[in-house]
């Protein structure tokens, strides 16, 4: 069987990005072949990887990044339900390449992956919304770890995950949700009960009278976490919601309050499907995190730089092809319509 070629985004070295042909592994009896329509850029892990800050497998240059991909299934192996062909699915990445490493491996025009690693987007009116599933699932896992029902929750940072975590905390019964965020445009998008811009107001004054049961960090900034700990109650819980090279905070507050610290590792089993149902039912307004877009033929270095450095950019969507879904287009691209 002749190996299929695919265009892919490749991190070829520190701060070096190429769009080049790669070779796919053959489709096995339990695999599917997906044609990518949209992918996106992770501003956490991928930023660190591109800067050479994760020097361990599978982040060995050159490698294909990407774990936020939506495409259409165009081929299915002999032991896979052939009824999946033609359906849109979220793909959490792939190792199905012969001549390049895959650090998640979802930023490719075609993707070969086991059928178990996809989530079919049944029930979602516009499949582009599936781009939000990994971030939504990450936020859901964080909120689950926080056991937020009937508790006061403080979320540090209103990037994409922080915004969704605050929204999900309210959905799952938190008695109060407060957030801090120094970039006003991000704060304006948030649905939290209390929204504090530490650049414009005193955080202590804004949160006066509140002790929080749960602190969720989505900033990765140690000084922000230390400040947040002042507002956590005795025996409170702290959830680390990002990826951190090192944890370096003042231990005295943890000691004096006997705080519990939990590291959230991406998402849990079943979270992607739960988020698919929440999106399909309009319970998560994920559209608000889709702030920027480009095509795969644009200057990718510029696109990644904007995704990493522009504080107004919550989520950069990369379009791999043009098309129409349900008759809706925006500048030739399908648009996402979900929310309340």
Image: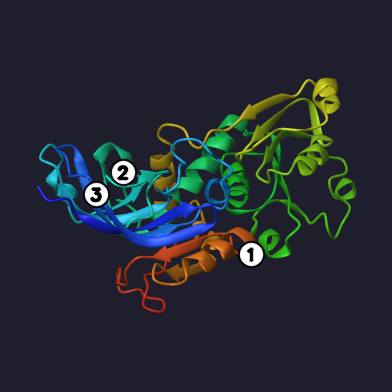
Q: Image point 40% across, 34% down: which residue?
A: 270
**Residue 302 visible in the snapshot:** yes
Q: Position of residue 49 (x, y in %)?
A: 53, 47
Residue linked to disc 3: 24
x and y, in percent, of residue 164 in the image: 57, 49
Query: Mark 1 or mark 2, which is nearer the start of the sequence?
Result: 2
Give the numbered dot on residue 79: none
Q: Nearer the viewer, residue 51 or 223?
A: 51
Q: What residue is shown with label 1? A: 310
Disc 1: CA contacts within 10 A as few (<14), some (14-19) or many (>=20): few
Q: How many marks?
A: 3
- Tell me if residue 336 can be seen: no
Between disc 1 and disc 3, whose residue precedes? 3
- Element assignment for label 2: strand
As drawn, the label of residue 118 is: 2
Question: Which circle's residue, 3 or 2, is located before the other in the chain?
Answer: 3
Residue closer to the observer: 229 or 3: 3
Please state which of residues 305 and 192 is positioned toward the viewer in this rendering: 305
Relative side of 290 to 229, left or right:
left
Marks 3/2: CA–CA distance: 17 Å
> Disc 1 on helix, strand or loop?
loop
């Amino acid at each position: 069987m002749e190996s299929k070629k695919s265009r892919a985004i490749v991190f070829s070295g520190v701060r070096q990005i190429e769009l080049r042909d790669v070779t796919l592994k053959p489709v096995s009896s339990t695999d599917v072949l997906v044609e990518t329509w949209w992918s996106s850029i992770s501003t956490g892990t991928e930023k660190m990887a591109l800067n050479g800050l994760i020097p361990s497998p599978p982040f060995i240059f050159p490698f294909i990044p990407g774990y936020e991909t939506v495409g259409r299934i165009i081929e299915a192996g002999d032991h896979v339900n052939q009824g999946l062909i033609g359906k849109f699915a979220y793909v959490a990445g792939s190792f199905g390449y012969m001549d390049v490493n895959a650090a998640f491996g979802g930023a490719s025009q075609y993707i070969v992956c086991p059928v178990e690693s996809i989530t079919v987007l049944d029930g979602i009116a516009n499949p582009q919304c599936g781009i939000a599933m990994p971030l939504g699932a990450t936020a859901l896992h964080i909120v689950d770890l926080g056991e937020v029902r009937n508790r006061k929750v403080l979320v540090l940072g209103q990037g994409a995950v922080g915004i969704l975590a605050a929204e999900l905390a309210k959905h799952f019964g938190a008695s109060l949700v407060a957030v801090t965020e120094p970039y006003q445009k991000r704060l304006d998008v948030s649905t939290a009960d209390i929204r504090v811009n530490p650049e414009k107001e005193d955080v202590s004054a804004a949160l006066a009278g509140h002790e929080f049961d749960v602190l969720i960090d989505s900033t990765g900034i140690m000084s922000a976490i230390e400040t947040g700990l002042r507002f956590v109650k005795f025996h409170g819980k702290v959830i680390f919601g990002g990826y951190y090279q090192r944890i370096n905070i003042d231990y005295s507050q943890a000691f004096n309050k006997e705080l519990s610290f939990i590291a959230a590792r991406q998402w849990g089993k079943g979270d992607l499907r739960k988020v698919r149902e929440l999106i399909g039912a309009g319970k998560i307004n994920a559209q608000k995190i889709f702030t920027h877009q480009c095509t795969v033929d644009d200057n990718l270095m510029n696109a990644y730089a904007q995704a990493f450095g522009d504080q107004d950019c919550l989520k950069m969507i990369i379009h791999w092809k043009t098309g129409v879904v349900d008759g809706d287009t925006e500048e030739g691209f399908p648009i996402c319509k979900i929310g309340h």
